[in-house]
Image (cartoon, coloured by chain):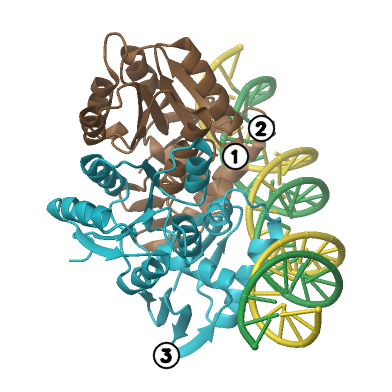
Chain colours: A cyan, B brown, C yellow, D green
Amino acid sequence: MEGIIKKVLIADDEPDILEIISYNLQNEGYTVFTAKDGKDAITQAQKINPDLIILDVMMPGKTGVEVCAFLRSQPAFKQTLIIFLTAMSDEASQIKGLETGADDYVNKPISPKVLVSRVNALFRRVPNKETGKSITIGNIVIDPITYLVKINDHEVVLAKKEFELIYLLASRPGRVFLRNEILSQIWGNEVIVGDRTIDVHIRKVRQKLGTDCITTVKGVGYKFEV
Amino acid sequence: MEGIIKKVLIADDEPDILEIISYNLQNEGYTVFTAKDGKDAITQAQKINPDLIILDVMMPGKTGVEVCAFLRSQPAFKQTLIIFLTAMSDEASQIKGLETGADDYVNKPISPKVLVSRVNALFRRVPNKETGKSITIGNIVIDPITYLVKINDHEVVLAKKEFELIYLLASRPGRVFLRNEILSQIWGNEVIVGDRTIDVHIRKVRQKLGTDCITTVKGVGYKFEV
DNA sequence: GCGATTATTATCTAATTGTTAACTGTAAAA
DNA sequence: TTTTACAGTTAACAATTAGATAATAATCGC
């Protein structure tokens, strides 16, 4: 059943906005959760693992941009859709917002109907979110919430990049990920790292996991296989 | 190899707009094509198969919305990203635009930088147009996603060039590929390799596959046959 | 700020993959 | 039958690519 009904988390400190957006999205068939500030948004996101998060930029405590940056640094939320909501319509903040990893940026005052259209458009493009859930393949369990990998119930502790690597590869078992894809998914498009960096991480993962579940496809990339 | 450089088609009847957007997208590394009206946009789209189409809504002849609706009705363009550009900022047209199947809707006056950010955001979300489908012919499956060739469920591992060769030939079974075509498709037009290079690769593929599914057409080229 | 962990780079090595060259086989044309 | 024009075969060589390891840099938690 999961994947059919989409979960949307809305974070805004203005109750009115929360209410009107909730109402409109619920009407459209989404399951809506709300958060009243940035910290709350993160807590809730981790609890309910939503398909989409709508973030007000100006919130007390943590701003929407900070929340987005934090979530995007976690493998579990790399693929989660994020829309910014803001009163600041200036160019610079819009660009900044989109570059932080948001999928859309909507200026206030908001037309609820336009927002709903934009939400629909995003979901049309990304039909089923494949991340956020723990992945089980054979005797290996990879859980992005706890950052733990279990092999035959034996826990393996991986560093962040190592975890992101195995999680990415395991998200589509068998599929070859080009080095470029790995770079843009894990390091981002702006960051430039040397050629051997991926290899070194791959090596560490292979070492720690013991099992050789990562196959090299020379000249192409790597893939997860059991 | 394709997949890394994205092709963007821009359709607008105002040359100034075309130019400024082209310039900014080219700077960002995209390959840009332009069309001056709706009809032209469709012709070009079919010719170059772009990854993203930016459509002005108000164009002489066919409007952007009509172009979008037409393209979306064709299987080849179901996955193509589409952004509307428009002076009409009213709610209704925005909703209409998004519901026609557009992925984003940007109001004029356009900030080129914001547009570039939005284009980047879309490509970030839809990174790989799943380049290449798996080919099944008889008892042979050639899958570019996993980089595997299966013969009667028996997996054969090919090197990169070998795989590219069989994939190219199998993409049009029965059709003869001239040696020149093979060279330009797999090696590219700049690279110059000796006459026997293709033969050697063909030989390895034949050897590894066991089955002789590659037929030599003397004086012409090679073709895939079962 | 300090120590520990994690990430990246540099360098070397090993392995694989790609190309060339020289030779052989073969089938059609002269 | 001989010639010719290709393609096939093979092995040697070249180039590319990834693995290993150690050293350096950056980051995190206290």
Label 1 Cα crowd, 10 Å radius (few <14 / some 14-19 / many 20+): few
Label 3 Cα crowd, 10 Å radius (few <14 / some 14-19 / many 20+): few
Q: Is residue B92 left or right of residue B50?
A: left
Q: Spot the residue most to the top.
A: B60
| Residue type for callout 1 | Asp
In the picture of the structure, the residue carrying the numbered disc 3 is A153
Assign a secondary structure to mark 3.
Answer: loop
Assign a secondary structure to mark 2.
Answer: loop
Gap between marks 3 and 1 measured at Cα: 51 Å
Gap between marks 2 and 1 measured at Cα: 8 Å
Task: Tell me the subunit letter for badge 1.
Answer: B
Residue B80 percent across, percent down from the top left: 35, 35
In the picture of the structure, the residue carrying the numbered disc 1 is B199
Residue B203 visible: no
Number of the label disc, if any, that sits on residue B195: 2
Q: Which is more toward the observer, A28 or B133? A: A28
> Which quadrant of the figure has residue A194?
bottom right
| Residue type for callout 3 | Asp
Task: Tell me the subunit letter for badge 3.
Answer: A
Q: Are marks 2 and 3 on the same chain?
A: no
Vertical comparison of B84 with A218: above or below: above
Task: Tell me the subunit letter for badge 2.
Answer: B
Dot in front, 2 or 3: 3
Q: Which is more toward the observer, A130 or B169? A: A130
* Residue depicted at 31% across the width and 57% down the height: A14
Residue B111 percent across, percent down from the top left: 49, 28
User: Do residues under tags 2 and 1 come within 8 Å of each other at their CB atoms?
Assistant: yes
Residue A73 visible: yes
Q: Quadrant of the N terminus of chain B?
A: top right
Label 2 Cα crowd, 10 Å radius (few <14 / some 14-19 / many 20+): few
